[in-house]
Image (cartoon, grey):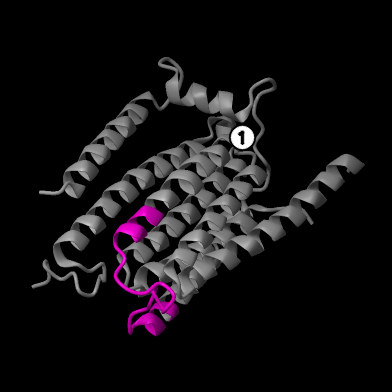
Amino acid sequence: MGLTLTHFLVLGAILFSIGLYGALSKHNAVAVLMGIEIMLNAVVITMVAFSAYNAVPKYAGLLTGQIFGIFIITVAAAEAAVALAMVIAIYRKRNTVDVSDIDMMKW
Amino acid sequence: MKLEVFIFMYIATVLFWIIAVILVGSALLVVTLRNIVHSALALIAVFAMAAGIYLLLNAEFIAIVQILIYAGAVTILILFALMLTRTVNLAFNSNPTNRLSAAAVVICVIVGAAIVYAVTSSTHAVSNVASNTSQLPPGINNVVRIGQLLYSPTDYSYVLPFEIASLVLLVAIVGAIVIGRED
């Protein structure tokens, strides 16, 4: 009865694992990005849960986890914009978005 | 325990389980559906349910930001990228997995189990110590407190990281335009 910190942390762990699977196992570069977005969301859930269940009363009003979450969302939006621009640029040059075929930097 | 508090906790727990099941289910749909546009649509459900989780954690501002930025902007970006980079017939397995996907499943299960072990049953588990929900001062809600933390120049605040974040966004906009431009 009642929600504990463990509920949210385990939920974040499960979501992180699912996103990791998507990022590791997909051919399409956009699908890899979707997996990374799920992983970032799992991290934000964990941060906000730590902010809500604060072990130290002195830091209770500082909301450090939520501020971290806001910065993670900011960086994730920037990352999504740049990465999707790169996907479109690569598609224009090489006519593929398959991450297995994009091996220009592979030695 | 007072009756209202009890009922509130009960409703919160039921809501948590409903949201968590939909969240994990749609995340699994994102990584398993064969049509990649359907995956992107399931991603919207993931983001919306994550906003519900933030509401349960008393983080109203992050919940609204999640709806605006993730469910609004990022999914539209992803759908536009899918539209502009269409290579195969969408109805026929447009979201294939590579040949190491079985190894990926094993790696993900190991990583997930390690995190769950670390937060629940290891000797340094954080969930052993943290139990009380943090309370804000009376008259100050979540959005007000985040505004104070982000903008106030004298208090303990995040003014400098906030300005650097705006610089990061500017660089990302310019970079996206430069990279995506036709030469």
Q: Quadrant of the N terminus of chain A?
A: bottom right
Instruction: Out of B18 and B151, give the one closest to the viewer.
Output: B18
> Would you identify the image quadrant in which residue B2 lies?
top right
Give, as a three-letter code, the residue at label 1: Pro
Q: Secondary structure at mark 1?
A: helix
Q: Residue furthest right?
A: B3
Q: Quadrant of the C terminus of chain A?
A: bottom left
Q: Quick check: B151 left or right of A53?
A: left
Instruction: Out of B26 and B102, give the one closest to the viewer.
Output: B26
- Say few, some or many: other residues with alpha carbon within 10 Å of mark 1 (under 14 / 14 to 19 / 20 or more): few
Determine if residue B89 is in view.
yes
Instruction: Out of A61 and B182, give the one closest to the viewer.
Output: B182
Question: In this picture, is B145 found above or below B119?
Answer: above
Q: Quick check: B15 left or right of B96?
A: right
Q: Residue at x 42, y 43 (%)?
A: A73
Q: Does the magenta run of residues contain B82?
A: yes
Residue B103 pos. (x, y %): 38, 82
Q: Residue at x 31, y 47 (%)?
A: A81
Query: Which chain does the numbered disc 1 sit on?
Result: A
Q: Quick check: B86 left or right of B135?
A: left
Determine if residue B125 is in view.
no
Q: Residue at x 42, y 68 (%)?
A: B36
Question: In this picture, is B183 found above or below B39?
Answer: above
Residue A75 pos. (x, y %): 35, 43
Residue at numbered disc 1? A57
Range shown magenta: B78-105
> Would you identify the image quadrant in which residue B21 lies?
bottom right
Q: Does the magenta run of residues contain B68?
A: no
Residue B65 pos. (x, y %): 51, 38
Residue B121 pos. (x, y %): 59, 66
Q: How many marks?
A: 1
